[in-house]
Image (tube, rainbow, N blue to C red):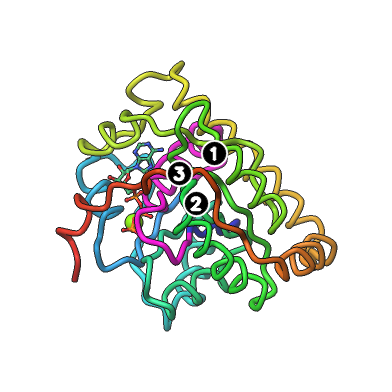
Amino acid sequence: MNVLALASHKGGAGKTTLAAHLAIAADTAGAGPVAVIDTDPQGSLTDWWNERGTETVAFAHTHPSRINADLKVLEAAGVALVILDTPPAIERSIASAVAAADLTLIPVRPSPHDLRAAGATLGMAERAGKPAAFVVNGAAQRAGITKDAILSLSRAGPLAPVTIHHRTVFADSMTDGRTAGEVKASSPASQEIHRLWAFVAERLAQIASSPLQTETLSLASARHGMAIRSVPRVRKTFGQRGQERKYAA
Ligand SMILES: Nc1ncnc2c1ncn2[C@@H]1O[C@H](COP(=O)(O)OP(=O)(O)OP(=O)(O)O)[C@@H](O)[C@H]1O
Ligand SMILES: [Mg+2]
């Protein structure tokens, strides 16, 4: 069984959006049975799954203190992929998910605040001895700030070779429990997610075949010594963080 965590210390980076989209993309690609776990008290992934009303992907509960035991139960039940969504600022929950995961994907919006926070999440994965990769999410098309963010992140650690752009269908589709690809399979949003899943699947396969990951980790550690610089030419902050706050515990 493979375990993927979506984690970022920064709120609103796109963890829940990418967790849901990757779960459906993985299932569609035949990598299931897939189970999602929502470790965030805000419960956004839970709401999405409840809206969905189908069991295309399974839903499981856990607690940071028993995450490893619960993962073993899922593995024994035949689950092939678990996707863990995490809260933005609850250090213990993020740390336990990252430590339990084979791979952590760190969504980063191309904004100075997100870039500053991204190194903390990568550092957490490195301390746990676990592989991680950044993915740029919510990027504006043809924006210099996006290119600058890609450059900064690729210097700081592993970076997914696909950028997820800001597209309203990512948010719209989730309001009634779907994903962008289920609204329109051939859309650019859907294609971006399938390319991101292809990257994740390849990394998980590499990790399974060489569990120590020494090369990736030593590379990441070497780069992590460099601060992730905030990007120049910033005129406004990315991110819409109003909507999800209504679930705050
Ligand atoms: N690529 C995107 N294009 C458009 N909207 C997006 C994109 N990614 C995320 N969003 C929207 O941005 C908001 C924050 O995304 P999301 O809830 O996935 O972030 P999060 O990291 O899970 O947040 P939190 O830290 O609060 O858990 C949501 O309203 C979501 O619909
Ligand atoms: Mg979330």
Helix, strand or loop at mark 3: helix
Q: Farthest residue toward the top?
A: 186
Residue type of the residue flagged with mark 2: Pro
- The residue closer to the viewer here, 155 or 173, is 155
Q: Is residue 179 left or right of residue 196?
A: left
Ligand 1 contact, mark 2 (Cβ < 8 Å): yes
Q: Magenta span covers which residues?
A: 7-33
To which quarter of the image does residue 84 belong?
Answer: bottom left
Check disc 3: other Cα within 10 Å, few if <14, some if 14-19, many if 20+.
Answer: many
Helix, strand or loop at mark 2: strand
In the displayed structure, would residue 189 be above or below residue 114? above
- Taking the magenta stretch, the answer to whether it contains residue 30 is yes
Residue 78 shows which numbered tag? none
Q: Is residue 87 left or right of residue 218?
A: left
Q: Nearer the viewer, mark 2 or mark 1?
A: 1
In the displayed structure, would residue 184 be above or below residue 108? above
How many angstroms separate mark 2 from mark 1 (CA)?
13 Å
Q: Position of residue 166 (x, y in %)?
A: 40, 34
Q: Quadrant of the N terminus?
A: bottom right
Q: Which residue in the protein does label 2 denote?
A: 107
Check disc 1: other Cα within 10 Å, few if <14, some if 14-19, many if 20+.
Answer: many
Residue type of the residue flagged with mark 1: Thr
Q: Which residue in the protein does label 3 denote?
A: 23
Q: Which residue in the protein does label 1 denote?
A: 146
How many angstroms separate mark 3 from mark 1 (CA)?
26 Å
Q: Position of residue 130 (x, y in %)?
A: 67, 68
To which quarter of the image does residue 247 belong?
Answer: bottom left
- N-term-proximal mark, 2 vs 1: 2
